[in-house]
């Protein structure tokens, strides 16, 4: 089950349909290259063009895309994960396509010049291989095996090929129009013949580490789309002014501080993206771009609304989100064709009344500003579809908003509203009304007149009851009323047969009415943090429910009829009063997530093995006397949390834990565990291990087999040394060994939480220990007596073989001691005993046999090595 979406994500999903419908009208107003955009349009709707190609082209081993037949067989090749971005970009190009021949483009084609604050970036990143393939010409199978020598056009995809130079050789082989060079290290066009570059119409060089745009760019006289986003470009050469045919220019996500001086000469430019740079000023000369239709300047450092923008007569979409703008100029009234204006995350304290003269406005976003009032002239926005005013200081909304009769989405969350906008019931087209985290006390009955409403959110207000008239809003699919003051479940909601999502967290509901059993279409239900005393049997009738949250109540028992909830995938029962594991839950064969944390459970029933599809289990902070070995039967389990911050502490983990072969996340923190299971290395898929605040003294050798481990937290234990082979955990990205009495390596080495630093220290320490042990062997061999050698062998459990006895007369005592100690070291190294441990074991044995003279020499060696580096 996916995580709950935030309010902003919900708005994005719920407004996507409108965006497509409203922006499709932009098709008739733009004029980008016909052939290219038609082909890309086809990528968005799945149709094929008779004029250009009838099949999806294939890619040969050199990354050159070509068509190989005229049939449709094989066209359903595997798509990579960027396919959705491809479609977005395809639709974007189609949006600005000229309609010189309207028969070639459907009037109903949807657009994705999506909101530039979130999706403009997508079509910057989305010129993928599949998109480019669709506009490549047809080739025969035979020609594909070479370099497609039978065609006069090519699309070349050389993404992430490690190129450091411009691929001039490919340009000489064939005529290329669409060149894709993203994720390489190409810094210039050096060596490329100007005649070879003339045919380029699309060039994309994202993520090449470019610090500046090559001056040779001026050679691309036929270029229509240039994408050099996501580089480190700080300077645009004046030669860019030579690109007279350019229609779309993407310079976003760079380091540009000064507006490129040559851009004002690009009279045919229609899309310009300079988002996420360091621009502080926009020159007046920008107004010369008379054909500009979409401009993205989000997340720069602009402190004023550039007046030059007000004189772009064809501008339809303007994104200035994420700047420092505190007011709008009066000249904004000149943007007569503006339909989409995004000004989120600025410093606006008021809106100039002239903005309400933009009668074509369809979408206005002003989230996270400092607006205290909205003018009554908002009534002029008769075409407005989306109005988002979240995170401002608004205390009321003018009554005349009711004149915005086309409004479909109204979001007013995180303001200071005490009541709904008056006459809101006149907004007959309203489909989404989100007024979370305000001070609304009452929802009026006339809300029932909003017959087209399908998403209603009022969480975080002061609402005590909900009008029963809501039952008339038959299209509602989602209601969010969490964190209010509701004591009784609103019965009107039970009559909504389209309702699938219902949120009531943080209220005062103590009883579930029988009427809810009729809402069998419900998929998602939340009653976290209420006053429920029982698991209501009425809930068990919701046979389609997939997500149920009853956490933070006072439930002591689960109804046996829960077995009827056959669709349940997520069940949250944390922070209740359960004293035994609810065995009834074990009948839910489709359950994937179960949270029983913060209860009083002591044992786990063997029936838990019936949960064949369980993926995540949280049983933290309970009263287990020992680790429930029954859990080890859950071979599908991927995440287990048995942290006991508020429960009874566990002292050991069973070796059967290794049976959970699918385990990826394990949390055993806040216990009293003294050691890891010896076979923990068998959890080959483990990605995250939290074992902080225990009493772990050492890590077993098999621990180094956890090759998939990426996150490791062992802070607050009793570790004194880390294994030398920790470098084998090459996947580790996050490590924490804080609050351990570490000596090897010392804590100052571990504080940086860098695996390389720790591994390098241990490597050097091992080399040092080897040298010290070799010197100790030499001291012992040169100074020990025959009698003490016999005693030493006994203490070290070294048996003297017949061969050793036979050589006593021919080999010196010193040589025999050396051989014996080397053999002892080899045997222990095979058992993964560290050199430091061998040294300590040997010195203890020498002390026990009374070899004090030798010990004095070893002590002197230790003092010397503390001051001298080997």
Image (cartoon, rainbow, N blue to C red):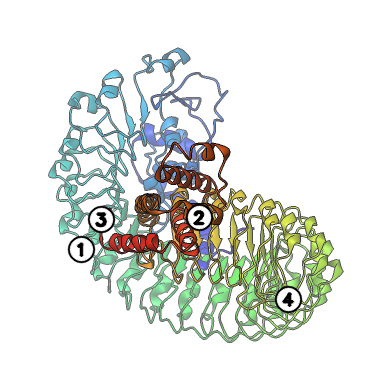
The residue labelled by disc 4 is 492
Q: Residue farthest to the front?
A: 809
Find out whether the residues at labels 3 and 4 contact each other: C-beta distance under 8 Å: no
Q: Tell me where residue 25 appears, x and y as whole percent.
A: 44, 49
Say which quarter of the image contains residue 302: bottom left
**CB within 8 Å, label 2 to label 4:** no
Q: Residue at x 60, y 60 (%)?
A: 676
Do residues under tags 2 and 3 come within 8 Å of each other at their CB atoms?
no
Name the residue beneath numbered marker 1.
Answer: 280
Q: How would you rate the neighbour count of disc 4 (Cα within 10 Å): few for under 14, some for 14-19, many for 20 or more?
A: some
Cα separation, mark 1 vs mark 4, equals 54 Å
For the point 70% across and 57% down, which residue is it? 592
Q: Pick whichever of labels 1 and 3 is earlier in the sequence.
A: 1
Residue 499 spot, x, y in % from top left: 69, 65
Mark 3 or mark 4, whichever is nearer to me? 4
Q: Badge 2 is on which residue?
A: 792
Question: Dot 1: what SS?
Answer: loop
Mark 3 packing: few (<14 Cα in 10 Å), some, or many (20+)? Answer: many
Q: Name which of mark 2 and mark 4 comes first in the sequence.
A: 4
Q: Is residue 163 visible?
A: yes
Label placed on residue 312: 3
State which tag comes first along the sequence, 1 or 2.
1
> Mark 2 or mark 3, which has the lower sequence index?
3
Mark nearest the camera among 1 and 4 is: 1
């Amino acid at each position: 089950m996916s995580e709950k979406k935030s309010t902003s994500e919900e708005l994005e999903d719920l407004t996507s349909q409108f965006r497509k419908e409203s922006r499709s009208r932009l098709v008739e107003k733009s004029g980008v290259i016909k052939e290219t955009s038609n082909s890309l349009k086809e990528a968005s709707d799945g149709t094929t063009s008779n004029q250009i190609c009838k099949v999806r082209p294939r890619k040969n081993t050199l990354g050159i895309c070509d068509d190989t037949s005229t049939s449709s067989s094989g066209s359903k090749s595997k798509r990579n994960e960027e396919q959705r971005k491809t479609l977005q970009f395809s639709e974007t190009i189609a949006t600005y396509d000229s309609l010189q021949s309207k028969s070639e483009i459907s009037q109903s084609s949807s657009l994705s010049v999506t909101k530039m604050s979130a999706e403009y970036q997508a079509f910057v990143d989305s010129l993928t291989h599949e998109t480019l393939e669709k506009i490549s010409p047809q080739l025969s199978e035979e020609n594909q095996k070479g370099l497609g020598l039978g065609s006069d056009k090519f699309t070349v995809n050389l993404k992430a090929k490690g190129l450091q130079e411009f691929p001039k050789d490919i340009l000489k082989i064939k005529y290329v129009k669409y060149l894709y060079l993203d994720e390489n290290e190409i810094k210039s066009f050096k060596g490329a013949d100007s005649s070879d570059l003339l045919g380029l119409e699309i060039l994309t060089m994202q993520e090449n580490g470019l610090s500046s745009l090559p001056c040779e760019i001026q050679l691309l006289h036929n270029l229509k789309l240039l994408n050099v986003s996501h580089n480190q470009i700080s300077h645009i050469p004046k030669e860019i002014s030579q690109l007279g045919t350019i229609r779309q220019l993407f310079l976003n996500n760079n380091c540009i501080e000064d507006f490129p001086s040559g851009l004002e000469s690009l009279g045919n430019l229609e899309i310009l993206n300079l988002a996420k740079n360091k621009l502080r000023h926009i020159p007046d000369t920008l107004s010369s771009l008379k054909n500009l239709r979409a401009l993205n300047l989000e997340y720069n450092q602009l402190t004023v609304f550039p007046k030059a923008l007000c004189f772009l007569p064809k501008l339809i979409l303007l994104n200035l989100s994420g700047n420092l703008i505190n007011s709008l100029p009066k000249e904004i009234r000149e943007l007569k064709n503006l339909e989409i204006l995004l000004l989120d995350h600025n410093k606006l304290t008021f809106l100039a009344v002239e903005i309400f003269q933009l009668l074509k406005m369809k979408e206005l976003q002003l989230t996270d500003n400092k607006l205290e009032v909205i003018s009554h002239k908002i009534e002029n926005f008769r075409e407005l579809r989306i109005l988002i005013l979240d995170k401002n200081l608004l205390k009321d909304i003018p009554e005349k908003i009711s004149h915005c009769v086309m409004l479909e989405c109204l979001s007013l969350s995180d303001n200071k509203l005490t009541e709904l906008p008056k006459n809101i019931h006149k907004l007959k087209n309203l489909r989404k009304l989100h007024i979370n985290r305000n001070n609304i006390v009452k929802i009026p009955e006339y809300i029932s007149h909003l017959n087209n409403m399908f998403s209603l959110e009022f969480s975080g207000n002061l609402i005590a009851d909900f009008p029963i008239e809501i039952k008339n809003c038959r299209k509602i699919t989602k209601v969010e009323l969490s964190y209010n003051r509701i004591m009784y479940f609103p019965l009107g909601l039970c009559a909504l047969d389209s309702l699938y999502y219902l949120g009531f967290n943080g209220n005062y509901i103590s009883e579930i009415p029988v009427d809810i059993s009729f809402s069998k279409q419900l998929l998602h239900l939340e009653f976290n943090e209420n006053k429920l005393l029982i698991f209501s049997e009425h809930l068990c009738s919701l046979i389609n429910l997939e997500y149920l949250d009853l956490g933070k109540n006072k439930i002591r028992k689960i109804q046996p009829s829960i077995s009827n909830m056959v669709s349940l995938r997520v069940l949250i029962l944390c922070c209740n009063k359960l004293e035994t594991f609810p065995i009834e839950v074990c009948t839910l064969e489709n359950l994937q997530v179960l949270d029983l944390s913060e209860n009083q459970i002591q044992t786990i029933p063997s029936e838990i093995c019936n949960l064949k599809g369980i993926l995540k289990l949280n049983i933290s902070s309970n009263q287990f006397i020992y680790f429930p070995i029954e859990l080890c039967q859950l071979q599908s389990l991927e995440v287990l949390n048995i942290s006991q911050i508020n429960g009874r502490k566990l002292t050991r983990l069973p070796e059967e834990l290794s049976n959970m072969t699918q385990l990826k996340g394990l949390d055993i923190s806040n216990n009293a565990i003294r050691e890891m299971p010896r076979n923990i290395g068998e959890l080959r898929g483990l990605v995250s291990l939290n074992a902080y605040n225990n009493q772990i003294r050492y890590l077993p050798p098999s621990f180094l087999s956890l090759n998939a481990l990426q996150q490791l937290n062992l802070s607050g234990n009793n570790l004194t040394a880390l294994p030398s082979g920790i470098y084998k955990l090459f996947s580790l990205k996050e490590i924490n060994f804080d609050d351990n009495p570490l000596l090897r390596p010392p804590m100052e080495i571990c504080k940086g939480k860098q695996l390389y630093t720790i591994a390098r220290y241990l490597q050097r320490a091992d080399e040092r220990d080897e040298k010290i042990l070799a010197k100790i062997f030499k001291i012992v061999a040169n100074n020990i007596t025959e009698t003490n050698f016999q005693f030493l062998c006994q203490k070290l459990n070294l048996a003297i073989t017949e061969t050793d006895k036979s050589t006593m007369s021919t080999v010196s005592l010193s040589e025999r001691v050396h051989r014996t100690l080397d053999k002892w070291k080899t045997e222990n190294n095979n058992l993964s005993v560290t050199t430091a441990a061998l040294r300590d074991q040997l010195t203890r044995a020498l002390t026990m046999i009374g070899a004090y003279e030798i010990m004095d020499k070893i002590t002197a060696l230790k003092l010397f090595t503390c001051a001298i580096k080997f």
